[in-house]
Image (cartoon, coloured by chain):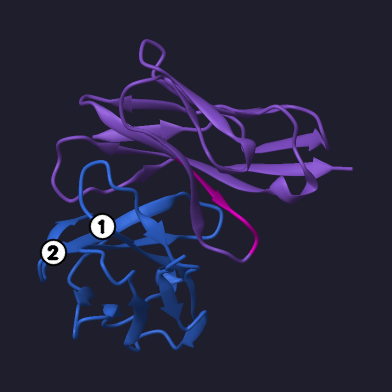
Chain colours: A blue, B purple
Amino acid sequence: EPEVTQTPSHQVTQMGQEVILRCVPISNHLYFYWYRQILGQKVEFLVSFYNNEISEKSEIFDDQFSVERPDGSNFTLKIRSTKLEDSAMYFCASSQGEGNQPQHFGDGTRLSIL
Amino acid sequence: AQSVTQLDSQVPVFEEAPVELRCNYSSSVSVYLFWYVQYPNQGLQLLLKYLSGSTLVKGINGFEAEFNKSQTSFHLRKPSVHISDTAEYFCAVRSIKAAGNKLTFGGGTRVLVKP
């Protein structure tokens, strides 16, 4: 069964540094998402992306965050200047369509900010 | 806006016993409902979904859930659990009409199946 793949599985970064988290969505999916889960807290929506633009973003997704689909297969999340509170598990997801189409999740990237 | 409450943060259960995980939601609009499972060191895997029609939905691994509109609940059940069902379970909702398709998750229920 096709999967969403995320790399790396664990990223350790110094505070203030830029970090890029990478995702390869399922190949025939058109909608892409990022979520995060701070340790011990709920999974929170960050952003959704369709047709090369952001379709919705949460208040967490401020100017420090950006997303990009640089080619036909990758979907990236960039954090420009990381803070300690950005430490979390970041999940990428994709769906074939909107509405009732389920979102398929990757295994996540654990981001640790030192 | 939507919110999801999972009333139990942890549920210990013996192998072959039944389990019920409670989920209540709040929304001003109609929603789709989902249950996801997260096994250790893995991502979220879809267990089942309610979109419309029959209020009892069956999912993978013997799980089922019942949508109750009047009580705004979507409780998950399994009649007989296995050790391999040890995982964290998340209830989630998505607005039927809103753009963006964001999922709103509950806080999760950690199920520990004991032999």
Q: Nearer the viewer, mark 1 or mark 2?
A: 1
Image coordinates for residue B20, horizontal then vertical, percent: 64, 27
- Looking at the picture, does residue A18 appear above or below residue A85? below
Image coordinates for residue A114, horizontal then vertical, percent: 50, 83
- Identity, as a three-letter code, of the amino acid under mark 2: Ile
**Residue interval drawn in magenta:** B35-40
Front-lying residue, B57 or A51: B57
Q: Is residue A114 visible?
A: no
Q: Which mark is on residue A54? A: 2
Q: Residue at x 79, y 34 (%)?
A: B13
Q: Is residue A12 visible?
A: yes
Q: Residue at x 37, y 53 (%)?
A: A44
B85 displayed left or right of B69? right
Secondary structure category for the residue under label 2: strand
Image coordinates for residue A102, horizontal then vertical, percent: 34, 48
Find disc 1 in the rendering and name its residue.
A96
Image coordinates for residue B48, horizontal then vertical, percent: 47, 39
- Asked whether residue A67 is drawn in magenta, I would say no
- Disc 1/disc 2 C-alpha distance (Å): 16 Å
> Which residue is most to the front?
A1
- Identity, as a three-letter code, of the amino acid under mark 1: Gln
Q: Classify residue B108 by image quadrant.
A: top right
Q: Main secondary structure of the magenta part?
A: strand
- Looking at the picture, does residue A62 appear above or below residue A103? below
- Looking at the picture, does residue B21 appear above or below residue A97? above
